[in-house]
Image (spheres, rainbow, N blue to C red):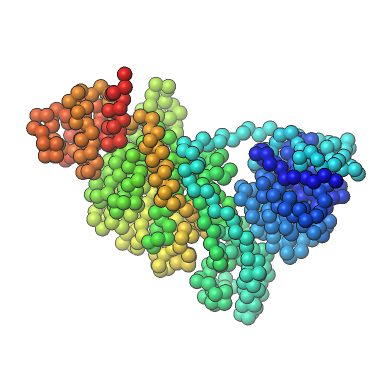
Amino acid sequence: MQKVQPYTGNEPYIFFSYAHRNNDAALQIIGRLMNAGYRVWYDEGIDPGTEFAEIIAAHVKGCSYFMALMSPAYLDSEYCKDELDYARNLNKPRVLVYLQDVTLPDWMQMRLSRIQAIHKYTYQDENAFYAKLFQAQGIRTCLKEGYAGDGTVPAVKKKPVARVPERMEMVQPKAVSPAKRIEGLFPMALLKEPVPVTALDESYENEQAEKLKKLLSYFKIPSQLQGVVHGASVTQYVLSFGPEVKVSELKAIEDNIARALDVFAVRMEIPIPGTKYIGIEVPRKTLRTVMLREVLQSEEMQYAKGALPVALGVDISGRPIICDLARMPHLMMGGVAGAGKSVCIHSIILSLLYCRTPREVQLMLADPTGVELQMYKALPHLRCGIVSDPAEICARLSELVSEMMGRYTHFQEKGVRNIDGYNAACGDTEEKMPRIVFIIDELSELMRTCKNEAEEAICRLSQLSRAAGIHLVIATNRPTAGVVSGMLRANIPSRIAFRCPTVQESRILLDKSGAEKLMGYGDMLYAPSAAPSPLRAQGCFVPEEDCQRVAAYFSANADGGVQFSDDQKTNPAEMSDELREWILSIAEVAAEYGNALSTSLLQRKLQIGYAKAARLMEEMERLGMVAPADGPKPRKCFLTPAQAKILLAERKEP
């Protein structure tokens, strides 16, 4: 018998565990898949020797989908446990396991609970089974000419695998319109590769489960362990309790459970959404780092349909969390310093840069510290320069309110209700409206300096700006009542809570406790506006080097699509020689003073006379580079140094 080498091609394929060999149902499923055109690899014909486990491990780790028919023969096979362990650690969006009517032992229940997104189909009604199988999301990627191994596998003697018996009617997969795949705007190689998944310490997990059972029995609380879910930072023990058990009794012994399991704190999810079970979340012995690249490459992100898809992280079972910022429509996050807020902001920015062009979304960044977001100052997506002064941030919020009301005036003229309707009604020659995302890195500094003005502007935007396509992302490391007021909480329904120092701050952010028991390092509770309860998740980690590489990529590959004010009347390339001589210096002065310009400021900084400064200011207003005069107030400048360099370069081209 010839040896079978693992498949080395790049095409996605299905690994069907065929360790149970003579199972008729398995033969029929394999034949049906291959006749339908799916790539299938199965292990029939391999000699179970010393290299058998290595070959199977290579195939399970390299396949796109793992399938196994849970039958008594499969459960008794020698390599069943190893295959399920390999499948459990697959870094794939989905793992398919098909079950037959058998009684699964405890060790099997434990392994199945660790496999991501199990689709359980009972193999009874054959036609219904295949209809569900062919409609499974993502399995279409394996749809090509079928094959078995590398062609050296001998044919099955008892029943031909490549043929389906005539008595079985073929069920063809229904035609499904292919989802539109997101075309990334920067190479994925700029981001750090995902960290390999480490093997679980099963002895430690089993020991923790036994301790939990003993403690509950000590307090005379009858329970039954239904499963274990392993997340990136916590392990959730799924328990069922009788109707006589009071929830208050369980809440009262949380500290006892934490002490018995020798962990910092435990959190109870009562109940687990969609079930009658209660989940006890216990910190893991070793944490797994979830890289942004891992979530961006997931199928959920690649086929996201939202207007502003954002990769936040993974949930407790390992599924990617992709939120649509346009549907939130505003987001507030808080937690202690170092808990992961700034990293989450970087994840949001890079997600938007990955899937949306400057004509689709414009960013406004407020960085009171002056150092956290400065790497993005040359992005073509920026609507204005990065603002650091609290008073200037309030001015930007007021300008955004004016922009919102102006957009509603355009909607009335078009007879539409929102930005999507306006863009759909625009003709080929009309410019579409981009969405605007305003990110404020630290709210507490803003509320300390100009609380009334900032709170009024944020409340107006949060109440009215959803239809106008304007969205707020606000972060703070002091989620106290003085910073996050009741008006802000009422108007910003979507929240993310990182680790909070006290239960009071957790209640301010989430309206319930729980954030004080988080572990930090990206461990968070995500509460979207429509969710009944917060979702435990592990946020994406983005190294600073990744952010700098992406920002440098956009700066070096700017397409010249300079964004000026909406009332721009003249082509910026038609500037005079006098303005072209001073434009770079003017842009640098504006960036130094928070994008605010005045004639007297140009006189002092450029050391020129009043007449020349006034001429330069009037020409920049005509070209739409600065806002019209508003009394004695400085004018808003829309020009950044990077855009000035682009205009000068265009001018030099023949």
Percent x, y of residue 21: 84, 50
165 and 131: which one is in front? 165
Residue 477 falls left or right of residue 2: left
Q: Does 598 sit above or below residue 369?
A: above
Q: Based on the displayed image, in which of its 4 quarters is residue 234 positioned?
A: bottom right
Q: Quadrant of the C terminus?
A: top left
187 and 523: which one is in front? 187
Query: Residue most toward the right?
Result: 158
Percent x, y of residue 238: 63, 65
Query: What's the residue at 56%, 36% (across, down)?
Result: 181
Query: What's the residue at 44%, 44% (across, down)?
Result: 350
Residue 559 falls left or right of residue 227: left
Look at the image and tell me whether residue 222 can be seen: yes
Look at the image and tell me whether residue 98 can be seen: no
Percent x, y of residue 90: 64, 52
Query: What's the residue at 27%, 28% (across, down)?
Result: 648
Percent x, y of residue 484: 35, 58
Residue 487 falls left or right of residue 17: left
